[in-house]
Image (cartoon, coloured by chain):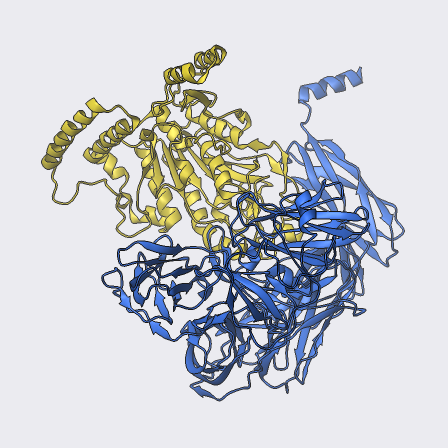
Chain colours: A blue, B yellow
Amino acid sequence: MNYIIRLYGMLLVSAMFSLVIVQPVPVTGHTTSAAPHSPSLTLITPRGVQRGGEYELNFRGARLQDSEEVFLYDSGITVTAVEVVDNANVKVKITVDENCRLGEHVAQIRTRSGISDYRSFYVGALPSVEEAEGNNSLNAAQKIEQNVTVAGVVGSEDVDYFAVDAVKGQRLSVEIEGIRLGFMFDPFIAILDQDRFELAVSDDTPLLKQDGFVSVDVPEDGTYFVMVRESSYGGNGNSRYRLHVGDFPRPGVAYPAGGPAGQTADVTLIGDPHGPVATQLPVPDSYGFRDGLFYEDDRGMTPSPIPFRISPLENVLEVEPNNNFDQCLESEQTMVVRAEPAPASDEVAEAGTCDGPVDGEQPEEAAPVQPAHELPRAFNGIIQSDGDHDYFSFEARKDQVFDVECFARRIGSGLDPVIHVFGPDKKSIVGDDDSRRPDCYVRFTAPADGRYFVRVMDHLRRGREDFVYRVEFTPVEPELRFQIPRVDRYSQQRQTIVVPQGNRFATRISATREDFGGELKLLSDSLPEGVRMIAPPMVGNLSEMPVVFEADESAVVGGHLMNWQAAKTDDSVSGHFFNLADFALGNPNNTRYYGCTVDRVGFAVVEKVPFRVDIVQPQVPMVKNGMINLKIQVHRDEGFEGRVLVQFPFRTPGVGTRTQIEIPADQTEANYPLNANGNAQLGKFPVYVIARGDADGQMWVSSQMADLEIAEPLVTASIKRTVLDQGQTAEMVCEFNQQTPFEGEATLQLMGLPPGVTVEQQTFTSDMTELRFNVVTTAETPIRLHKGIFCRVTITRDREPIASNTGWTELQVRRPQPPEEQTQESDAAGE
Amino acid sequence: MDRCPDHFLSRRNILTIGAVGGLTLSNFFRIKSAHADQKHYESTEGTAKSVIFVFLPGGMAQQESFDPKPLAPLEYRGPMGSIETSLPGVRLSSLWTNTAQIMDKVTVVRSMTHGEAAHERGTHNMFTGYRPSPALQYPSIGSVVAHEFGPRNNLPPYVLIPNLPNAYAGTGYLSSSFAGFALGADPAQENFRVRDLALPGGVDVEHFARRRRMLDVVNDHFRQRENSDALDSVDTFYNRAYSLISSQAAREAFDIEKEDDAMRDSYGRNQAGSRMLLARRLVEAGVRFVTLTYGGWDHHDGIEGRMKNQVPPLDQALSRLINDLDDRGLLDSTLVCLCSEFGRTPKINGNAGRDHWPKVYSLLMAGGGIKRGLVYGASDSTASEPDENPVTVQDWATTLYKCMGIVADKELMAPGDRPIEIVDGGNVCTDILV
């Protein structure tokens, strides 16, 4: 099963396959000769536009003065011009298609020196009006027409009121985009009548999380008030909102909430004030992050998508009563199984209205009776009333394994589902509550052939007419996905590939293999001319790998959104890149309240930067419990005299190092210290360093891909614990275990000695089995057991040191005997 | 016998309720027995007449402060080097250059340990000596000191610089009259003035006395109708506030401007320096327990840069404080304790920081009966676990109380007239006492 399905459960437009290639457009405005780097993008305004028009957006950020291009991750929008205003602002002219998908659209800027963060803006179906401040009471409510989108801001303790006329029997819907605009703003909305009574309120919703929506049946002709505030009367300049007000439909959940891609789905939309709506809706033909079903009637269209799983599974709809095993078996005698996907249709059938929930109804096109369902299937139902339990039965054979995913909150339902799978003996085999927070998941292995049951209920035994769920039984399938690990906890820093002309850039790749193992390879089919990707296969037991990109000096400055793929080396499993950015973080502990996922990576060749770095390939291995200094050279162009910060990001198991070292402005090389512990993984691994130079922003380049070999130590040693009195001298015996012969002499240095203790550095050769030397203590040597003393053995090969720690031991320093006792002892000895 | 004044569930009430709700005779006698057995010890001033409790919220890394591991693997060792100190063989992290020079005057405990890896729970530990409990709010050490000794020289016994740092620095189950006096302003700011310490503008002494007499009339009226801890507490607060406002010497204790420029510069004109200098003035004037906080030490990322920003002012102020107290002859009667709620992980994480680690961490104590020039306890080679002489929070708190002359085994009365030990089960670390 695809990861995207599991994680987001909504379908879409695979931006992956519907990439809008944005042609470079004329750039106007001033540019400067000072090279900016690491551009950032913080805000796109206005926060939304109406589809079917031309607009000018302002992209605000930093170091944007050499902007050239805008990357758009979603279809339906064309960039017609990019005009640089200043370092922090870029005007972008766009054309939005008439049929552009509604909702969130993601964009980022490519400059001649980098790629910005990605941010989003919204496309709506309704014309926009601006909030006019002063609308802070019912008496001063801002008058608006129906079917508009109000763009406003909630300040601290601010309450905004809007007055709208409506007639009896009309549907009045309100939906707010607040936290979805990318800042920590938790809005609260309400519809009030003329007597100030609340007709409906909404703070948080299962569908829109911190954002809310309401839809009411207008009781009388008159003026109604829409109120907007922050849920706890907070607010600030970033508490922007887009408020959709009108008589458009705004159901909350679809039932069933899944169907095959590219088909027409028969669904019932629940949540409209006029009752459930049975209709047919077109299903997108591929998976995506920002899509779902959009419902349109003669009054308008839902402002945001209704979550819907794109799934090839056959749908099974519940038939009530199915509240226990016996009822389940009885009800399934009449159950409908949609054995085939719904017929394709290019047109959405006219929406009809049904009188109530579908449970218990006998559809007209009854399918053959199913004594038990053969998996894989998707079981769909609604926990309609308090205490409701839904049971389904299915056939499984011994050792069949299925992933059982229950979707509820992920499809906009308020249900907090709990699932259990029961055996033919009606005893529970496996169950789950919150693995998918708060949805659930289990992996089920059938212990024997037979008829099994799955039960769904609410965690608090609640039930409501919109508590829709969907339980998918799918065979276990391997999955692969990968991303660039974050280098900063809360930003998108270095989450793109930016290669300077005539230079290199590198990153780590973090892959997740599910239900398979083995070596992986990275694929790059869309690199521009003059750019190469160096990516040795990822070792089977590792989940990270380094990748270096090299650009020729002649490579053309430009970029695109790269559809980056990876695969098992035998091509049996493949997967692709994804990235999840934090858009709204809040308490506690910077919890992500709203994020944005993309499935391609921004790639660019940028202008030259004035320095390069290289690793001097080490000629000797680093051994277990050993260390090595990796020599790093920096080559600065004339005119660049800054310091260079170097990092060593990719470390194989057991290898450790410092996070960063600095090569000062007056130096051209430095040693990057590495060490390996006693369990370090043996082998030869690709490594790189990435280096930062500062200009106007940060310039990042990498070294070439070098090799680092981890090997067994050539010799190990052991030293027995030594005991002596303070101020005395004792002999220590170091016994060697020579594992690999070496030439010349090795040095042995005792480390971790306490104060007042001296031991001379020793040498030994490959044929020696032991070494004896004296430990000298003084009156300053503390009287106690001194731990953590060890030998550092250094062997030189090819004029490079192979250093390792070995022979950990202890030194017990005792209090010296009093002189009189010594005298007595000597007297006794004399006698 | 002390009674908990602020709870409806007195022993008498329990008996009454028991008559209705089924309290058995055996339960009654068990409660009665508990009262009879309440452990009581008279608190008399100990070696530490005052305490300056420097709390570094967030969890300062032991590796980048008092317990560097210069021979550990790089990923454990961290980005900082280490330096020698005035104690042979004892090293501190490289930023603590001034503290290294006063190591012969202080004790560093390198084997503190507890099991609470969340900030609020670790903080609760260090402010109360107890693990948090949903059943009871424990008083802070400062409030216990206020409870046991009361004010000295018309000064509040417990002062918080600059503000109440967290919910656990309060009075817990004790009466709110033992709350700390919070400055309400940062002494590092220009024109620093302690809130509510001076008469309001336009109010002279005569006016003030008249107002107070009027207030007394009103209070007497309420006191005849109500009997609650809240009123008593307010009364206590007012009385102490009157004492403060009316005492020139007491007011001047809070006036950092009385220090000359050279002294202020030597502490550092920053948060750490100003707060510690004010703390010294306060204990010199008679305040028994001063709690001050400095910085944020939750270094999950970029620990090198953050330590370089925060440690130098702290290092300068701390060493100056110890030397200043010593020069004035106050160090032997003033206990300085610098600590965090926990330490940080042995290994540097992927963001060049360290995460929470309560299993072993370090703190520094000096003066007030604490030995000079001692490193007590040890962590293992990677600062992962205590290796020698582990010190629990209870042990540390019991030792602190011991220095102040309070027997931590003493029981105070909590709601429901439950006798609760000041510290439950700690042992005095006699090895660190003079």
Q: In this view, does A251 lie above or below B287?
A: below
The N terminus of chain A appears in which quarter of the rendering? bottom right
| Residue A719 percent coordinates (x, y) | 79, 40
Residue A322 lies left or right of residue A739; in this view the side is left
**Image quadrant of residue A282?**
bottom right
| Residue A672 percent coordinates (x, y) | 66, 62
Q: Is residue A359 above or below residue A120?
A: above
**Image quadrant of residue A310?**
bottom right
The C terminus of chain A appears in which quarter of the rendering? top right
**Image quadrant of residue A189?**
bottom left
Q: In this view, does A31 lie above or below A312?
A: below
Q: Which residue lies furthest to the right in this view?
A: A767
Q: Is residue A694 above or below residue B354?
A: below
**Which residue is at a point 31% across and 29% down the rendered structure image?**
B177
**Which residue is at a point 43% across and 40% down the rendered structure image?**
B54
Using the rendered image of the protein, determine whether residue A110 is visible from the camera's viewpoint. yes
Residue B358 lies left or right of residue B329; in this view the side is right
| Residue B94 percent coordinates (x, y) | 54, 50
Near-viewer residue (B277 or B427): B427
